[in-house]
Image (tube, grey):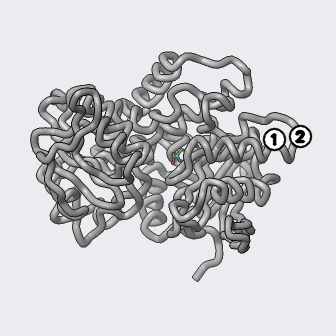
């Protein structure tokens, strides 16, 4: 087995097909074949009971040809070097698909954060930054939130960086709380961007929100904001799930009270407001995670983790459209099976780019010291993701390829162009006389 920080074989063979389609220079293939920089760190944390635990963390900077590398930090017990490498590669593609001046990176800590007290989580977040401090910076690599890491964690991380540097450097981390230099609109950005892509697809297909029934797998930050905004826009959210369970109501659910109840009790239940307080309503049925994925709905939203649909369950999926808010929720084999069955997949590298788009806006605001209203941020987000989505839709149609292939063609073409500008074999072999 190679010890190079490479993406997994499936992703490798997919990108090879993109290279062939675009006829990119051999130099570009070689440069994109493995991560530019990969670090594993040990983070010692003093626990509340006085014991010491040492957590493993990673930061992988996949490619920085188009700008400083960018990507979140994931806190999860399944985080590994291989996972962080794949995620850093997808960040590289994603930033290029939406034409941000960033390369791609990802970080992760192998931990179940739900097991930690708030003080332990703060120590771990600060310890991670002490371990990678000299690898990051506003012009080098800019972390952000990802699965299980939120604005509070980003605030601690930015503060730790500032303490080490003995100066404020807000642009080193994005997704911070607004009071600590965060951007208006960042928390809802991934969900909002995903809804924009769905709306554009729906209007091209002449479908109104009222005609589309949606099931959402993954009711974390991105899944919640997507569901809330989609419900407001008139779509019918018929099912929701989180790591503990799933609920279904064919008449439609209101995500807002369910979210509030979940945050209070860590339990997913159908709730309605009665007399200005939350009270239980028994209409919704409890279903299993598998049943949610296999519901007969128009749109299945995947907003949890990788590999939710694989070759085991792909053939049982009844949704006509899949909206990938998570990174890599469909395996390559399942992708092919779904395509053969005529399922349209709106791909992760486009659909979930809203988060990094507003991270870029936060970085710009931090560097200029000029802060914008939520309306301005939302307008810029809608414009950027809308433009990228239209370009992907047009390319998929013109070249008769899937939307995932079209998005990768857009992204890889931009990366290849940047790399080629630094000179390729053809350039260096040409005679100058
Ligand atoms: N973790 C998010 C993603 O996967 C956001 C990254 C960022 O804002 O840098 O796109």
Q: Is residue 405 visible in the rendered structure shown here?
A: no
Where disc 1 sits, the SS reads helix
Give coordinates of residue 266: x percent, y percent: 38, 53
Q: Residues within 10 Å of mark 1 (few under 14, many from 20)?
A: some
Query: In this view of the protein, which residue sits in the foreground, 389 or 188?
Result: 188
Residue at position x 59%, y 38% in the image: 175
The quadrant in which the N terminus is found is bottom right
Label of residue 254 in the image = none
Left or right: where 272 falls relative to 23: left
- Distance between the alpha carbons at the discs numbered 1 and 2: 6 Å
Query: In this view of the protein, which residue sits in the foreground, 141 or 222?
Result: 222
Give above or below for 374 relative to 59. Answer: above
Pointer 1 with pointer 2, Cβ within 8 A: yes
Q: Is residue 287 visible in the rendered structure shown here?
A: yes
Residue at position x 53%, y 65% in the image: 115
Residue beneath label 1, please?
162
Residue at position x 68%, y 70% in the image: 49
Q: Does the residue labelled 2 lie within 8 Å of ligand 1?
A: no
Give coordinates of residue 426: x percent, y percent: 66, 51
Residue at position x 48%, y 65% in the image: 12
Give above or below for 392 relative to 270. Answer: above
Q: How crowded is mark 2: few (under 14 residues within 10 Å), some or many (20 or more)?
A: few
**Ligand 1 in which quarter:** top right
Q: In which quarter of the image is residue 124?
A: bottom right
Where disc 2 sits, the SS reads loop
Residue furthest to the right in view is 166
Give coordinates of residue 123: x percent, y percent: 71, 57
Query: In this view of the protein, which residue sits in the foreground, 78 or 20?
Result: 78
Query: In this view of the protein, which residue sits in the foreground, 289 or 200?
Result: 289
Give coordinates of residue 427: x percent, y percent: 70, 47
Q: How many marks?
A: 2
Residue beneath label 2, please?
166
């Amino acid at each position: 087995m190679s010890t190079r920080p490479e993406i997994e074989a499936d992703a490798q063979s997919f990108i090879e097909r993109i290279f062939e389609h675009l006829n990119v220079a051999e130099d570009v293939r070689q440069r994109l074949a493995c991560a530019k920089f990969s670090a594993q760190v040990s983070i010692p944390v003093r626990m509340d009971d006085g014991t010491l635990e040492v957590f493993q963390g990673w930061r992988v900077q996949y490619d920085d040809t188009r700008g400083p590398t960018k990507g979140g930090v994931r806190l999860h017990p399944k985080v590994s070097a291989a996972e962080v490498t794949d995620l850093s590669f997808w960040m590289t593609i994603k930033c290029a698909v939406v034409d941000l001046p960033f390369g791609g990176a990802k970080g992760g800590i192998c931990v179940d954060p739900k097991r930690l007290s708030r003080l332990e989580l703060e120590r771990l977040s600060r310890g991670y930054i002490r371990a990678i401090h000299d690898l990051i910076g506003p012009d080098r690599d800019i972390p952000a939130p990802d699965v299980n890491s939120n604005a509070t964690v980003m605030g601690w991380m930015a503060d730790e960086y500032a303490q080490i540097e003995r100066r404020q450097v807000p642009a080193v981390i994005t997704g911070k709380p607004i009071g600590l230099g965060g951007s208006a609109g960042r928390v809802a950005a991934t969900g909002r961007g995903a809804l924009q892509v769905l709306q554009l697809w729906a209007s091209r297909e002449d479908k109104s929100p009222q005609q589309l029934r949606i099931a959402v797998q993954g009711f974390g930050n991105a899944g919640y904001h997507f569901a809330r905004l989609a419900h407001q826009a008139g779509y019918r959210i018929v099912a929701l799930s989180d790591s503990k369970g799933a609920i279904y109501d064919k008449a439609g659910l209101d995500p807002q009270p369910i979210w509030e109840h979940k945050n209070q009790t860590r339990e997913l239940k159908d709730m309605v407001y009665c007399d200005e307080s939350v009270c239980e309503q028994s209409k919704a049925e409890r279903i299993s995670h598998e049943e949610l994925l296999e519901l007969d709905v128009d749109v299945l939203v995947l907003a949890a983790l990788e590999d939710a649909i694989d070759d085991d369950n792909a053939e049982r999926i009844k949704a006509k459209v899949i909206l990938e808010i998570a990174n890599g929720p469909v395996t390559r084999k399942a992708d092919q099976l779904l395509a053969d069955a005529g399922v349209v997949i709106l791909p992760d590298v486009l659909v979930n780019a809203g988060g990094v788009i507003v991270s870029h806006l936060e970085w710009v605001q931090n560097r200029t010291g000029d802060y914008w209203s939520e309306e301005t941020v939302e307008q810029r987000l809608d414009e950027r993701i809308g433009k990228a989505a239209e370009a992907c839709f047009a390319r998929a149609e013109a070249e008769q390829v899937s939307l995932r292939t079209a998005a990768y063609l857009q992204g890889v073409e931009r990366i290849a162009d940047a790399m080629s500008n630094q000179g390729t074999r053809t350039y260096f072999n040409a005679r100058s006389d």
